[in-house]
Amino acid sequence: MKAVVLVGGFGTRLRPLTLTTPKQMLPVIDRPMLEHVIGALGRHGVDEVVLSLGYKEDVFRKAYPDARCAGVALDYAVEPEPLDTAGAVRFAAEAAGIDETFIVVNGDVFTDLDVGQVWRRHHEVGAEGTIALTPVDDPSRYGVVPTDARGKVLGFVEKPPRDEAPTNWINAGTYVLEPSVLGRIDAGRRVSIERETFPSIVEDGGLWAVQSDAYWVDAGTPDTYLQVQLDLLDGVRGPAVDGIATDAEIDPGASVEHSVVMAGAFVAAGARVRDAVISSGARVLAGATVERSIVGPGAVIGERAEVLDMSMVGEDAEVEAGRSLHGARLPEND
Ligand code: GDD
Ligand code: MG
């Protein structure tokens, strides 16, 4: 099975971290997000991935110079400009010469869902496209997908107001598509698969869905980027992993609880780190507190500073001694 993995977005919700690193190359515990995503695809039978790239494509190429990632062969399709989700699929499929049934995956989704099952159902019903669905509490930030009892899709509404969502089953960002879908996508302009392509297939009765309640999180927001990491520590997806890198330096007088501390990071005496991510090479100085927040690579949290309530400190940024950040971004977004 061949999969196009979409990784060309700007990752705006994860700024400032994504100003220097594209979203799917942000670390999750010990590896880039992308390796977790492609690793899961590989375990379910995908043997070739076409990376659909644009924003900061060089970071991906540098990380995988031998064109393999998590044991899966990689091909690169670099858009001259962002073509949005459907435009990107068409561009990548053409670049890779795809002319058979293929898979498309949003590159920021952490899931245990079995894409092989979606593939089988797709062929069973003779669909033009089949999408995986997952249940969520608040569907308003996703593509909402009502179906009939057999799984035929009745509509596709991207990000509706919360009280107008017809169901809690949403687009899980994993699709099986026939090459005929490519003919529905105009070349050379921005086309959204969610707002244009899927609604057009629904009209022709060719879009089907498979519901799954397997583990599923879109890691594209500060909260969920933190959540996928804490879930791995908590053993929510299989055996619990240790979030402290072997070469992280944690002073015996520091308190580090339920957190990820990456390679080469340092936590000084009297510092407190809880429910947080300290990225590689970052330093949390004496008496500082980091709670429910993300400290980017190489950042410095000054003595007695507080970084709290889903704050994000960008790569190499410095929080001055004694300063308090609550739900803040540093540097601030423009
Ligand atoms: N190549 C390329 N070009 N990739 C893109 C572009 C583009 O122009 N725009 C976005 N992407 C990539 C992003 O990098 C990401 O991996 C994926 O497409 C989806 O974009 P997001 O920005 O993460 O979308 P979302 O999370 O708001 O919503 C999407 O995902 C939800 C599930 O996770 C939609 O598909 C929703 O319908 C869905 O429910
Ligand atoms: Mg997303």
Image: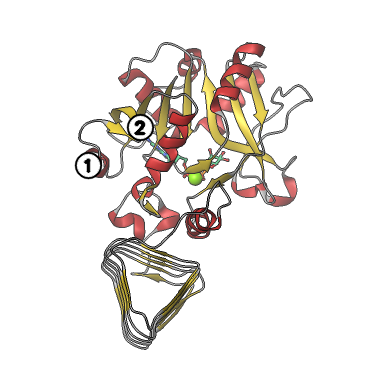
Q: Earlier in the sequence, mark 2 or mark 1?
A: 2
Q: Amino acid at mark 1?
A: Asp
Query: Do callouts 2 and 1 mark residues in contact (Cβ within 8 Å)?
Result: no
* Residue 151 left/right relative to 222: right
Residue 119: x, y in percent? 56, 20
Q: Is residue 234 visible?
A: yes
Residue 47: x, y in percent? 39, 23
The residue nearer to you, when weighing 49 against 78, is: 49
Q: Amino acid at mark 2?
A: Ser
Q: Which residue is mark 2?
A: 52
Residue 126: x, y in percent? 63, 11
**31 lies above or below 282:** above
The residue nearer to you, when weighing 207 against 225, is: 225
Q: Tag 2: Cα neighbours inside 10 Å, few (<14), some, or many (≥20)?
A: many
Q: Tag 1: Cα neighbours inside 10 Å, few (<14), some, or many (≥20)?
A: few
Residue 180: x, y in percent? 49, 12
Placement of the C terminus among the 4 image quadrants: bottom left
Q: How is the image coloured?
A: secondary structure
Ligand 1: does it lie within 8 Å of the C-beta at label 1?
no
**187 lies above or below 163:** above
Q: Which residue is mark 1?
A: 58
Residue most extreme to the right = 149
Ligand 1: does it lie within 8 Å of the C-beta at label 2?
yes
